[in-house]
Amino acid sequence: MSSFILLFSNVAFSDNSTSYNSNTVAVSVNTSNINDVLTKINPSVVGIIGVYNSSAQISYQSEYLDSIAHGTGVIISSDGRILTNAHVVKDLKSIVVVMYDGKTYEGKLEAIDEFSDLATVRIDKTGLTAAKFASSDSIYAGQSVLAIGNPLSMSFRNTVSHGIVSGINRGMESNYRLIQTDAAINPGNSGGPLVNMNAEIVGINSVKYIGSAIEGMGFAIPVETINYVLNHFDLYGKVVRPNLGTIFEEDILSKLGLASNNGITIVNFEGSSALQAAGAVAGDRLMSINSESVNSIIDLNEILKNYMPQNEVKVKIKRGVEEKELTVKFN
């Protein structure tokens, strides 16, 4: 058994990969548990290779080999369903899935949702090892996680990096909240799983900050969003979202990532706007939907996950100092 000992003062935490003795205040981190996690998850992690459509706007991944893209995916059902990022597969005219044992299969794009950056690919193969999902309420800052993927090229297939969940509910130029991690994520890791020490998926690695003064800031799409998208894929073949037909602007606090209770301001309307039809005008601030506060665009998108087109909701707006409640029927 491989392990190392850390000594702390007044330490108090627990994780499936750690144990501590409160009398001696000594923490033992069991590094052999990483091997156990990899034994479970590696058979579910795949490589995705494809050739770009000639009309595609080529991404950074094409720079490695003659417009050939590569990324990562994870098997989520034993009959050949694979979850990955939408940006990995959206412009590919052909898809090849590389299994953990090196065998390859033709992949077919099954469903894609660029708004959430998630997609599913199907291969004609059964009896596969499907990864399990963690429960969304089991994810917390400080939790030990592993990122598995294919950085830079397929010669680095199933590379693993170890880190923690650095933060949850992060907004990072995204449409939904993300998980932040310091586990190393590089080009090619996109679409691969971020897993806890039970080998359960907590997120799908999607993006990272890059810069000479930036280290250890990667982001993953959390289980809650994954389940939402997969449920819509199963029911409708795509994600069906309600629409307010409105362009909003956040206040300066929200733009800076600080707490705000000023709502989001209506800038303009698009087409037959549901919000405009209910009586809202440009300059109004949207404060809440069915009593759930809206203080950022991400807040709004997260709330809209709970509704479908044609649903009716009670919306609170603020016009100057006056508050109004409107009944809105989503487009």
Image (cartoon, helix red, strand yellow):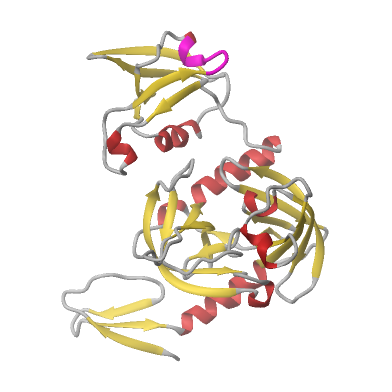
Q: How many badges with numbers are in the image?
A: 0
Please indicate, yes or no, whether residue 238 appears anywhere in the rendered image. yes
> Is 273 a magenta residue?
yes
Identify which residue, 34 or 266, lies in the foreground.
266
Q: Hey, which quadrant is residue 164 in on the image?
A: bottom left
Question: Which quadrant: the C terminus?
Answer: top right
Range of the magenta residues? 270-276
Please indicate, yes or no, whether residue 74 appears anywhere in the rendered image. no
- Residue at 76 percent across and 45 percent down: it is 55
Q: Hey, which quadrant is residue 131 in on the image?
A: bottom right
The correct choice, above or below, for 261 with respect to 111 in the image is above
> Is 262 a magenta residue?
no
Where in the figure is residue 261, as x and y percent of width and height? Answer: 26, 31
Please state if 97 lies on the left or on the right of 262 as rendered: right
- Residue at 26 percent across and 40 percent down: it is 259
Where in the figure is residue 20, as x and y percent of width and height? Answer: 28, 79
Q: Residue furthest bottom?
A: 1
Please state if 232 lies on the left or on the right of 160 as rendered: right
Identify which residue, 204 or 143, lies in the foreground.
204
- Residue at 71 percent across and 38 percent down: it is 237
Where in the figure is residue 151, as x and y percent of width and height? Answer: 59, 70
Please state if 129 lies on the left or on the right of 250 as rendered: right
Where in the figure is residue 8, as x and y percent of width and height? Answer: 21, 79
The correct choice, above or below, for 191 with respect to 34 in the image is above
Please state if 289 lies on the left or on the right of 35 as rendered: left
Question: Which quadrant: the N terminus?
Answer: bottom left
- Residue at 36 percent across and 65 percent down: it is 213
